[in-house]
Amino acid sequence: MAPDISRRGFLTGGLAAAAGLAVSGLALPAALAAPAGQSDQDLCTLLDLSKCIGCEACVDACRDQWQADLPDPVQPIPRSLPARVPTEDWSGRKQVRDRLTPYNFLYVEHLEVEHAGRRVELHLPRRCMHCQNAPCADLCPFGACQDEKSGVVHIDPEICLGGAKCKNVCPWHIPQRQSGVGLYLNLLPQYVGNGVMFKCHRCLPLLRKGQAPRCLAECPQQVQSIAPRSAQAAQAQALARDMAAKDGASPERWRDYVYGLEENGGTNTIYVAPLPFREINAALLKDHQAKAHKERADAQAAGRPPEPGNLGRPAMGLVKNSMGDAQNLTLALAIAPVAGLAAGLGRLFSKTRRLAGPAAAPAKDSDSQKGGQA
Ligand code: SF4
Ligand code: SF4
Ligand code: SF4
């Protein structure tokens, strides 16, 4: 784990305060005292979707906590030459909360699913899954995306160049890019990088102070709990067996009612739902298609730039372990030493930049494309 995350502080501080918020009773003290680096001791969140009422207090809490800290881009935003990658600018659309954006780390899907002859209302909070074998961290060429070994995967905005490798290798394409911010402005902004990638960091700055993630603490339904992964996996199985039985299925089919336990080789975000996830995913895909279609038509009618489709709206399909792929593994091994060096240099450069003052103004032949196109 990162040396500056104090598991003891975590226990005695905010998480103790959050004991009434569904973190108690799950062997947290033992996990916090356990040696770092054991994957079954990663801190893992468990979301019981049968409790979620879709109020979005979690989204409000996340936005309230983090949005003001997120940088605004320089204007005009430098354009990549040659036009390798599109400029993505969400700074004029910070109010968007129905998808993941650089300024919105969490959103809630509101679904109606046809299931066993009835309509089931379901609400799904979505954000980074914090994978145990995170390809975004293993394959970031600059070492900017890091696996904290405490179950948190985060992107260091000080050294990220916005190349979007993390988004491309993430099975859910979670990280989102804001152009015109970050270290690349001080390098060769038209040729190197394109901004910074942002996503849920599981409130890492709060965790480091011993406080609970905001979305967990503010939920009125105690949908989420946080505890060592081994305990959460056992709890997920017990809940899912119960849900399968209530749904009229054999408890032996419990895996159908769980998501995140095995996806992408296992994640530190586990969902349990009162109906099978293959049906939830089918409903999600249908819903996303309808939304994208409507947004495209609305934008066209209003003469606005095209909407970015379903960018930032992850599905919940089966996901194989991407780091089990020989090609990715070989690439990760090749990248590791270079990424470590690049991260060190990036931090040094970033510190120098902070001491030197604000970023230089971008070159004159720059522009921006509002809307956050992929
Ligand atoms: S997780 Fe909690 S706060 Fe978020 S929408 Fe569901 S009930 Fe509301
Ligand atoms: S969900 Fe995507 S962004 Fe999050 S840790 Fe996994 S691979 Fe990385
Ligand atoms: S853990 Fe923190 S950063 Fe992540 S979605 Fe919740 S409030 Fe936002």
Image (spheres, helix red, strand yellow):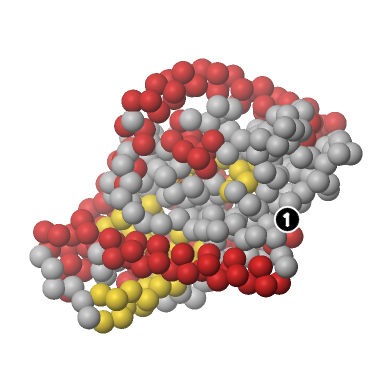
Q: From this viewpoint, is residue 14 visible?
A: no
Against 54, is 139 above or below?
above
Residue 268 visible in the current orientation: yes
Which residue is at a point 53% across and 67% down the rendered structure image? 293
Which quarter of the figure is the N terminus placed in? top left
Which residue shows up at 13% across the image and 68% down it?
Answer: 249
- The image position of residue 23, as x and y in percent, is 38, 59
Residue 26 against residue 218 in the figure, above or below: above
Residue 336 position in % (x across, y down)? 49, 21
Q: In this view, does 49 lie above or below 89?
A: below
At label 1, counting other C-alpha atoms closer than 10 Å, the crowd grade (few under 14, some 14-19, many 20 or more) is some
Amino acid type assigned to the residue bearing label 1 in the image: Lys
Question: Residue shown at 65%/53% (left/top)?
Answer: 372
Q: Is residue 235 left or right of residue 215?
A: left
User: Which is more toward the observer, 89 or 221?
Assistant: 89
Instruction: Find residue 364 and report its image quarter.
Output: top right
Mark 1 vs ligand 3: CB below 8 Å: no
Relative placement, left or right, of 58 versus 48 is right
Q: Is residue 328 above or below residue 300?
A: above
Counting from the top left corner in percent of width and height, residue 245 is at: 14, 70
Numbered disc total: 1
Is 77 positioned to the left or the right of 122 in the image? right
Q: Which residue lies furthest to the bottom in this view?
A: 118
Q: Nearer the viewer, residue 163 or 241?
A: 163
Q: Residue at horizontal 68%, vertical 48%?
A: 88
Residue 150 at x, y percent in the picture: 43, 40
234 or 341, which lies in front?
A: 341
Q: Can you identify the residue that label 1 sits on? A: 370
Q: What element carries label 1?
A: loop
